[in-house]
């Protein structure tokens, strides 16, 4: 799994959030488990 630039990752154990600032091969891990890619936040509508 490659790390994606600008994406946020979250640890399923402790809830730590990480922002990827440099893409590359490999996986971001915490507590010996791979971190999960976070879903993008929804922006409020500008009606």
Image (spheres, grey):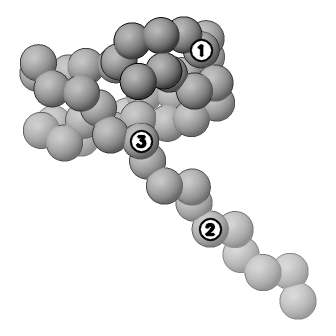
Chain-order first, disc 1 or disc 3: 1
Chain-order first, disc 2 or disc 1: 1
Q: Residue furthest front?
A: 1
Q: Specify the quadrant of the image occupied by residue 44.
A: bottom right
Q: Specify the quadrant of the image occupied by residue 18.
A: top left
Residue 42: image tag: 2
User: Residues under labels 2 and 1: Cα distance?
Assistant: 24 Å
Query: Relative to 19, does residue 26 appear above or below in the rendering?
Result: above
Q: Specify the quadrant of the image occupied by residue 1.
A: top left
Q: Which residue is mark 3?
A: 37
Q: Are marks 1 and 3 in contact (CB under 8 Å)?
A: no
Q: Residue 36 placed where, x, y %?
A: 32, 40
Residues packed near mark 2 inside 10 Å, few (<14), some (14 to 19) or many (20 plus): few
Decide if residue 36 is in sight here.
yes
Q: Which mark lies nearer to you, 2 or 1?
A: 1
Q: In front: 45, or 22?
A: 22
Query: Relative to 18, does residue 22 appear above or below in the rendering?
Result: above
Q: Which residue is mark 1?
A: 23
Q: Describe the element under mark 1 as helix, strand or loop.
A: loop
Q: Residue 38 placed where, x, y %?
A: 43, 47
């Amino acid at each position: 799994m490659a790390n994606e630039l600008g994406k946020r990752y979250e640890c399923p154990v402790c809830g730590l959030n990480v922002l990827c600032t440099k893409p590359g091969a490999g996986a971001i891990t915490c507590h010996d488990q791979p971190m999960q890619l976070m879903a993008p936040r929804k922006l409020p509508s500008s009606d």
